Amino acid sequence: MAEVSLSGVSKSFGSDVALSDVTMTVPDGSFVVLLGPTGAGKTTVLRMVSGLDTPDAGQISIGGRDMSGLTPAQRDVAMVFQQYSLYPHLTVRQNLEFPLKSPVLRTPDAAIAKKVGEVAEVLQISHKLDNKATALSGGEMQRVSIGRALVRNPSVYLMDEPLSSLDAKLRSDLRVELKSIQAHSGATLLYVTHDQIEAMTMATHVGVLDQGRLVQFGTPREIYENPVSVYAASRLGLPRINVLPADIFGHGPTGATTIGLRPEHIVQGEGEESMVQRVEHLGDQTRLHLVFRDHDLVTVTDAHTTLTEGDIVRIRPEKPYYFDATGARVG
C-alpha cells in the first residue's frame, strides 16, 4: 500500500471552481474520509487521484511517485462508485473474477478462485456466486461492487459514497465490515461521504471540504473536539452543534459573534431557565429540544427522564466554542 499526497491541487470546470489549492497527505495504511455536502469537491478529489480527471495545477503522488501523465490503469488504484457498475450478463463469480483476469495482472486461475472465495466469504455473498448480477438485491449488488475492488491488491482503494443507497441496517453492517477489512489488510483507503456517522465510525483521519477548499484535516476526535471553524464543527456530531449569539450566556471573547455548544456540553439543573419544547426518546438516550431566550437548542439527557413539553429546565454552558463573523474559531 502507499501514501497519497496532494500538493496545491486545483481544478475548475469552466467558471466553476471544484478544488482550490488542496494540500493533503493520506498516510500509508490509513482510512481517510472526505466529508462535506454536495458540491464540496469530494468526488473531484477521488477523480484526481484515480486519474479520471487531470488537475489544472498542483501535484499528486502515490507512494512517492508523481502521477502526472499516468492513466488510471498505470496508477494501480481500485475505485468503487455509488452506482453498482456491474456487468449484468455475468454471474457474481464472473464479476468478481473480471479485474483479476486483466491482461495487466495475469493472475493464475487457482489464485483467482482462492481470492474470489475469500472476498465472497467476507462480504457474505458466497451463496450468490453463481447468480446473475440482475438477480441480486441492491445491497447484494453493492457488496459485489465493493468485492470487485477488494479482490485486487492495489496501492490505494478509492470509494465514492458506496453505502448511500443501502438501507440503514445494511449500511451499519457494511460500515463494520469495511473498517474491519481495511484494518486487517493495512490498505490505504480514501472514502467519500456526506454521512458524518460513517466518518466518525470508520475514519482514522477526516478531511473536511467546503466549496473546493480543505478547511480541516485530522482524526475524527480532533475535529470534533477542536474544530477550526463553525463549518468544521457542524460537519461532525449528532445532534448537530448548537450555534447561538455569543452573548446569550454572557460576554464572550473579543471578536466573537457566535457561541457553539455541543449537546453534551449543556449542563442541566443549574444556570438559567429554558423551556422544554419537545422530548425525543431514542432508547439509549433522550434528546431535549429547548427554547432559551427565543433561540432553539438541542441537548441530551437521561434515557428515562420524566421531563415533558412545557417543563422548565435550568441550563448553563460547558466547554463552549466561540466563532467570529466569518465563522473562524476565536478564543
Image (cartoon, rainbow, N blue to C red):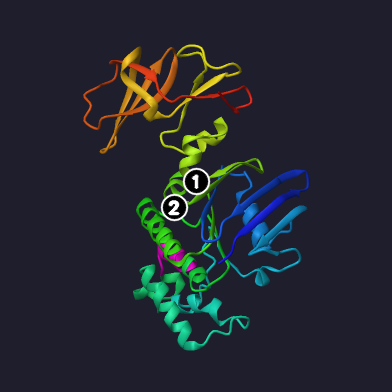
In the image, residue 206 sits, relative to residue 290, either above or below, namely below
Q: Secondary structure at mark 2?
A: helix
Disc 2 marks a residue whose amino acid type is: Met
Say if the magenta span includes residue 329: no
**What is the quadrant of the C terminus in the image?**
top right
Q: Nearer the viewer, mark 1 or mark 2?
A: 1
CA separation in Å, label 1 and label 2: 11 Å
| In the rendered image, the vertical position of residue 282 relative to residue 120, given as above or below | above
The 10 Å Cα crowd at callout 1, few under 14, some 14 to 19, many 20 or more, is: some
Name the main secondary structure of what is drawn in magenta: helix
Residue 294 x %, y %: 44, 13
Report whether 40 appears left or right of 263. right
- The location of residue 54, given as percent across then percent down, is 74, 58
Residue nearer the viewer, 210 or 67? 67
Q: Which quadrant of the rendered structure holds the N terminus?
A: bottom right
* Element class at badge 1: loop
Q: Position of residue 153 (x, y in %)?
A: 53, 72
> At 40% across and 58% down in the image, what residue appears?
174
- Residue 36, by quadrant, is top right
Farthest residue, direction bottom = 109
Q: Earlier in the sequence, mark 1 or mark 2?
A: 2
Near-viewer residue (306 or 94):
306
Residue type indicated by callout 1: Thr
- State the image coordinates of residue 57 (x, y, percent, origin top left): 77, 52
Which residue is denoted by mark 1 in the rendering?
Answer: 219
Magenta stretch: give its range.
Answer: 136-145
Q: Is residue 9 left or right of residue 193?
A: right
Task: Between residue 138 and residue 119, name the one nearer to us.
Answer: 119
**Image quadrant of residue 67?**
bottom right
Q: Which residue is mark 2?
A: 202
Query: Looking at the rendered structure, which numbered label has been put on residue 276?
Result: none
How busy is the neighbourhood of tag 2: few (under 14 within 10 Å), some, or many (20 plus)? Answer: many
